[in-house]
Amino acid sequence: MQIGFYGAAQTVTGSQHLIECNGARLLLDCGLYQGKRAEALFRNRHFPFDPRSIHAVLLSHAHIDHCGNLPTLVKQGFSGPIYATKPTAELTDLMVRDSAHIQEADAAYVNKKRLAHGEPLVEPLYTQEEAAAVADHLAPIPYEQPFESIPGVTARFVEAGHILGSAAIALTLSERGRTVRLWFSGDIGRYGLPLLRDPILPEETDYLVMECTYGDKPHRGPQLAYEEFRETVRRTAERGGKVIIPAFAVGRTQELVYWLSQMISEGSVPPLPVYVDSPLAVNASEIFKRHAEVLDEETRRFVQENRHPALDFPLLTYIRSVEQSKALNDRREPMVIISASGMAETGRILHHLKNNIEDPRNTICIVSWQAPNTLGRRLADREPRVKIFGEPYEVRAEVVTINGLSGHAGQDLLMHYALAGNGRKRKLFLVHGEEKAASILRGKLHDIGIYQVEYPALATRVEL
């Protein structure tokens, strides 16, 4: 029995972990690697294993850094099932199709300039047709229902509280008379966030593979983040500007709309229009509504009464067409624009940033962790000028970073999570985190008696 760390290893993107047992191969997640463009393209096109050798995939959730390279896996010969919770299966189909659309559109936009300059053309990583092929492999499994994923490996999805349908994965591996328990955290959510149920802590396990995105600091309470977000919107509206928010279309967008509806209804911000410029978010919100059974109790009441704030907010407009999206750039009154992608690397958010970044009345609001070498990270780092579609722009808009909105567990919950898995006696692998976060968390875990902590490098293989 082995586990290999082939993505989200000493970084926070491209989740891929390969389990080998009884001569079969089981892949935990198949996410897109996001970073420097040339490196990202190479890593996403070239797997460190033969996709044809993978017997099954277990998918923790539908964020693109966990599911986004499934089309390439299928394109290169994977033919097995992709197991996920039902909401994750539905969202994944949407996410990879949307990813393909964005990649095709961005390639077409760049190729116009390349063609004019006589430069070689680029190709998208995968097409919409190739992304659609993933649906034939998706195999929905209910939460808490054990099933055999590959021979000798029983799996079970457990609520992770990160986005709709997100799951930790409990595995029991049996080979040659030996039984090993492994718990893969996926992305761990937080307590008390809107919409979602709270994450479930792990049971005692032999090996815990745990994310550590925010291992270097505890989070502030959601109420403080709410207040900071409210002040940002109010301040920007008073000076006549737009609030531009790069946000993931699934999860973060719905939470932001939920909060904006509260702010406007209580009169703490002006009744300004809110635009969600993401066709994906429209469909994602419908999936939220269909799966009220996996939302928290308060949200279920909203859904059942058909007044879910993400769907029925009076000042909210979902933008589908390119023409509607472009029309926002000609408007000068205060508004909020929420658009994908969350790290400002692809999609319509790039056009909104391009058209608004040099106006000091406006605010760019960063509401999630930003991977190194992405435009979102450069904005969060307050770089004075950035490139968008290869062209330089001065950052004259205010840039605000609101960390408390994160859907990831903070340092305190990560320590609690590790202890719940009996970390003092078992081995813990830290993944999905940068070196600083992992190093600080490792020291904190050592202080509470958890000593067997590893931070595996890319392509590390470990015998279980």
Image (tube, rainbow, N blue to C red):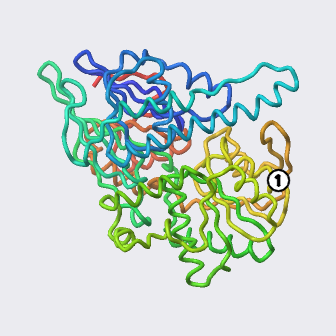
> In the rendered view, would you say 197 is above or below 135?
below
> Which of the pair 413/34 is nearer the observer?
34
Image location (x, y in percent) of residue 343: 63, 46
> Hey, which quadrant is residue 170 in on the image?
top left
Give me the residue at 63% from left, 34% from top.
103
> In the rendered view, would you say 387 is above or below 304?
above
> Which of the pair 165/11 is nearer the observer?
165
Residue 407 lies left or right of residue 393; in this view the side is: left
Give me the residue at 45% from left, 24% from top.
73
Instruction: Check disc 1 and report the residue beneath it.
Output: 395
Which residue is at the far left?
A: 177
Image location (x, y in percent) of residue 407: 48, 56
Q: Amino acid at mark 1?
A: Val
Image location (x, y in percent) of residue 338: 63, 58
Q: Please rate how many residues cluster around mark 1, counting C-alpha atoms within 10 Å: few if below 14, some from 14 to 19, many from 20.
A: many
> Hey, which quadrant is residue 276 in on the image?
bottom right
Give me the residue at 62% from left, 53% from top.
320
Which residue is at the far bottom?
A: 267
> Which of the pair 449/71 is nearer the observer?
71
**Which quarter of the figure is the C terminus placed in?**
top left
Image location (x, y in percent) of residue 392: 85, 42
Give me the residue at 11% from left, 22% from top.
177
**Which quarter of the figure is the N terminus placed in?**
top left
Q: Secondary structure under badge 1? A: loop
> Which of the pair 212/98 is nearer the observer?
98
Residue 196 lies left or right of residue 115; in this view the side is: left
Q: How many marks?
A: 1
